[in-house]
Image: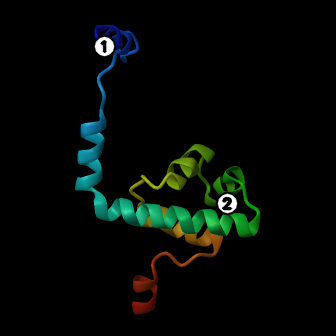
């Protein structure tokens, strides 16, 4: 048993795990994270249909490819401005309640 514990300790990371903080973040931000993930899935589906890369979408949105990558991970708290840029670039309707009301 000591040899197993010793082997595990040899491979132990020098930095502490952040799983607790990440789990608390997901719990505290559950509602907008769910929406962000749903938007990311819609974007990926539309990008595939249109044959767009992250780089080409970034050019259409006027932002960096790195920012598009962050959005597509489904963990980005998107502003209304960014949502509108996504809608215009991909022809999606992400804010139907607002546009239908006015």
Q: Nearer the viewer, residue 66 or 74?
A: 74
Left or right: where 88 falls relative to 23: right
Which residue is label 2 attached to? 60
Asked whether residue 43 is in view, the answer is yes
Q: Specify few, some or many for label 1: CA neighbours under 10 Å numbering under 14, 14-19, or 20 or more.
A: few
* In this rendering, position of residue 9 left or right of residue 99: left
Q: Earlier in the sequence, mark 1 or mark 2?
A: 1
Residue drawn at x 42%, y 53% is: 76
Q: Nearer the viewer, residue 38 or 80?
A: 38
Q: Where's residue 38, x and y in %?
A: 47, 67
Instruction: Determine whether the residue tagged by mark 1 lies in a helix, strand or loop.
Output: helix
Find residue 65 and name its label. none
Q: Which residue is mark 1?
A: 5
Q: Are marks 1 and 2 in contact (CB under 8 Å)?
A: no
- Residue 21 sits in quarter: top left
28 up-or-down from 39: above or below = above
Q: Quadrant of the C terminus?
A: bottom left
Q: Is residue 60 above or below residue 84?
A: above
Q: Quadrant of the N terminus?
A: top left
In percent of the image, x 40 and y 83: which residue is there?
98
Q: Is residue 102 visible?
A: no
Q: What is the x, y in percent for residue 97?
A: 40, 85
Nearer to us of marks 1 and 2 is: 1
- The residue located at (59%, 65%) in the rendering is 43
User: Residue 9's spot in the image, x, y percent?
Assistant: 33, 12
Element assignment for label 2: helix
Which residue extends farthest front? 1
| Label 2 packing within 10 angstroms: few (<14), some (14-19), many (20+) | some
């Amino acid at each position: 048993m000591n040899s197993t514990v010793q082997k595990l300790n040899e491979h132990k990371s020098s930095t502490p795990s952040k799983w607790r903080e990440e789990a608390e973040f997901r719990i505290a931000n559950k509602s907008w994270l769910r929406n962000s993930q749903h938007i990311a899935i819609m974007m990926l589906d539309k990008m595939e249909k249109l044959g767009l890369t992250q780089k080409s979408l970034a050019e259409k949105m006027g932002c960096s490819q790195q920012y598009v990558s962050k959005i597509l991970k489904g963990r980005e708290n998107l502003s209304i401005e960014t949502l509108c840029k996504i809608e215009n670039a991909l022809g999606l309707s992400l804010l139907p309640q607002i546009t239908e009301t006015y």
